[in-house]
Image: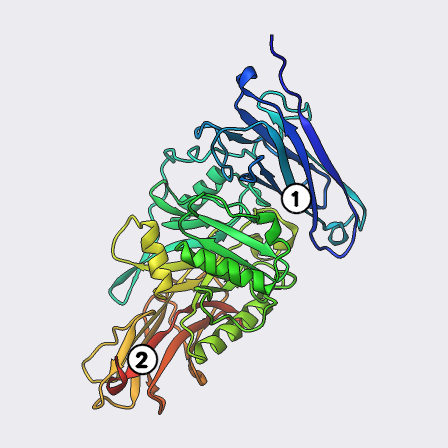
Amino acid sequence: MTSRPAAVSFGGVAPAGDLSFRIATGTFVLPDLAPSGDGALSVRLALERGLQVLLEVLDPDGRLRLQVIRYKAGVSPAAIVSADAARTSLNARTGPLPPGDWTWRAAVRNVSPLDAGGPRPLRWTGTVAPLGAEASDGPGDPDDACPAAESLERAFAAPAAPLVLRFGGEGWAAGDLHQHTTLSDGVLAPDRLAEANLAAGHSFFAFADHQVLQPPRTLGGAAALGGVELTTPVGHFLRLGPLPADGLIPDAPGAAFADCADLARLRARFRAEGALLVLCHPCFPPWHWRCGALPDDGAPFDALEILCDPTHPGAADAAEAALALWTDALSRGSRTVGVGGSDYHGPAEGKHAADGGARPGDPTTFVRCAALPLSHDDVLSAIRAGRAAVGRGFLPGLAVGPAVPGQHPDRLPGDVLSVPPSAPAALAVRAAALPAPSVPGPLRGELVGAGGIRLRVALPVDGSAAVLSVPLPDRPSGWLRLDVRDGEGRLAGFTNPVYWTREENAP
């Protein structure tokens, strides 16, 4: 009888230091698994509280086979790499398991200085074993399942009707672009978070786990966008959309050491793969953008996350700074799109004491849609075109047109308005917040252009629109955006701009 190959363990002790990631690497010998009939490897991480570990496993040919992340204490669920696609976990590459010297490499960060226990050295352990020969350190958190790629493709019981609001003769579908599951540092497993999104009426949502790339799927009729949050020392950004050709992000732990030049190379590669790039929480220390002005080179960000996790105590200041960053980019001619994201991690985090805790869809990103269900391309195309608005439980509405008697403004966010030479030197504007918001009122709208705030207006709370006339600046082109503030002056929502150009300057 052939004996089963034994498990291999590795790891170390991470000192308490400057909160930076530190690299660790090593090798292990994998025997030929064919005699035992296994053909699958199980990989686990065990961490003390206060550690964050990003692990990669490479085969003897240097081919990346598996990526595992652990951001909380305890033993991770088993991640499986196999020759059988049905058994292979997310963020693993299916294929034969050749015998020989395999390599592991990890990025390890000790964040104990941030918790109540104070700075202290912490131990972590990785275990690699043929499936069925894992070390007896327990099965991991049962709510922490590391699913195979197809395991979420199931029927969801009675999802709520999709939330679609109407403004300007168009439908606007609700969703959330930034959420975390137990595959990184979230509280809910992917299937449970999908259920929460469907219950909220979301037509699209993105699981954007740290360094864990999830594929695009359709869950309960909603577009679950393929996503990942690339977490680096100089900023975090979301990669949304189609998977890379090999299904993995090369050197994900290495991204934990990326500098601004590395990020430019990553952006260029991801854009070539057709992904949509969102710079998230750009002004939210310590996770903020540290590479200066928004890039306008060959690999810019498609979108900027303005409102992020509004229940966080620092959210209001971070939103104002992000709004200023966006306004500056628009004023320099950029067409960067503004979006929102809940950055949802779970319902019971201490940092979310305000407003009763975080929830998926706070804030909500709305995209213009012709019909449901939305495909992944429908959502990404709408965002790229700026056909989006963001609000805390409401849809900010903006329609712009020339101030011509009897002509209704009909250009919506993302549209371009050509102003004829004979038109009055003013723009007609309709501004609204639909339906009646739950944020503290009354609501104030600010019409913002390249020269700053053009007009302030009290927004009706009965679902109707305020009708305004805004002087047309003496310039060949420009843009107009609606920002919405609650009764305490905090940013509660915004639209993307309507762009305008005088007809003689139109292309």
Q: Which residue is mark 1?
A: 106
Q: From the viewer's perspective, is residue 61 above or below residue 298?
A: above
Of tags 1 and 2, which is closer to the observer? 1
Residue 170 rendering spot, x and y as whole percentages: 26, 62
Residue 411 vertical position relative to residue 100 in the rendered view, above or below: below
In what element is the residue under mark 2? strand
Q: Residue at x 75, y 49 (%)?
A: 112
The C terminus, quarter of image: bottom left
- Quarter of the image that includes the N terminus: top right
Q: Position of residue 407 (x, y in %)?
A: 20, 79
As drawn, the residue found furthest toward the top would be 1
Seen from the viewer's position, the closer of residues 60 and 191 is 60
Residue 103, located in which quarter of the rendered image? top right
Residue 51 seen in the figure = yes
Looking at the image, residue 86 lies above or below residue 462: above
Looking at the rendering, which quadrant does residue 167 occupy? Answer: bottom left
Q: Residue at x 42, y 34 (%)?
A: 150
Q: Which residue is mark 2?
A: 500
- Crowd tier of the residue under label 2, counting other residues whose Cα lies within 10 Å: few below 14, some 14–19, many 20 or above: many
List x then y, in percent, for residue 382.
Answer: 34, 60
Q: Is residue 57 above or below residue 450?
A: above
Mark 1 is on which residue type?
Answer: Ala
Q: Secondary structure at mark 1?
A: strand
**For residue 362, side relative to residue 242 (left or right):** right
Q: Is residue 54 left or right of residue 385?
A: right
Taking 382 as reference, is 306 left or right?
Answer: right
